[in-house]
Amino acid sequence: KINVILGAVGLFDKLRQQNRTNIENYVEIYIKSDLSKIIKIGKKNIYKKYGENIVGKDILAEMPKSPDIILNNKFDESINILSIRLLKKIKKIVKN
């Protein structure tokens, strides 16, 4: 009974506000990561493949103004640990 809406870098604030208004128990999660580290460790091949004119790198992205949760991913913890931490935060926010 979980609906997931994934908005990569390009999701607009107007749409996020519409989601918040129209979706029950909507939780906005902003995952922050250091772009230079993502490129350096090769986490996303798009930066090597295209090199330029990428949203978030060369093109300014519209980042969330007031997310419910901010998760800082420094790539120094396992995805399992990050997931557990995220689920705990979601449970504190979502109504049963």
Image (cartoon, grey):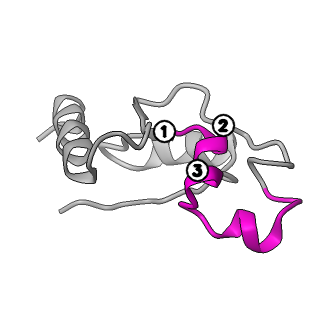
Residue at the spot of label 1: 30
Between the residue at mark 2 and the residue at mark 3, the CA separation in whole angstroms equals 17 Å
Residue at image mark 3: 38
- Badge nearest the viewer, 1 or 3: 3
Is residue 47 positioned above or below 96 on the image? Answer: below
Q: Residue at x 29, y 41 (%)?
A: 77
Along the viewing direction, whichever of 79 and 71 lies nearer the viewer: 79
Residue 61 pos. (x, y %): 75, 44
Q: Which one is in front in this view, the residue at disc 2 or the one at disc 3?
A: 3
In the picture, measured across the screen, residue 52 lies left or right of residue 95, that is right
Task: Please tell me how crowded label 2 is: few (under 14), some (14-19), or many (20+) other residues with Cα within 10 Å.
Answer: some
Q: Amino acid at mark 3?
A: Ile
Q: Residue 51 lies in what quarter of the image? A: bottom right
Q: Earlier in the sequence, mark 1 or mark 2?
A: 1
Q: Residue at x 74, y 67 (%)?
A: 48
Q: Position of residue 74 (x, y in %)?
A: 44, 37
- For the point 23% across and 32% down, the residue is 89
Residue 28, image x, y percentages: 44, 40
Q: Dots 1 and 3: beta carbons under 8 Å?
A: no
Whole-angstrom CA distance, mark 1 to mark 2, is 8 Å
**Label 2 belongs to which residue?**
63
SS for tag 1?
strand
Residue type at tag 1: Tyr
Q: Nearer the viewer, residue 49 or 29?
A: 49
Q: Residues within 10 Å of mark 1 (few under 14, many from 20)?
A: some
Which of the two discs, 1 and 3, labels the residue nearer the N terminus? Answer: 1
Residue stretch rendered in magenta on the structure = 33-54
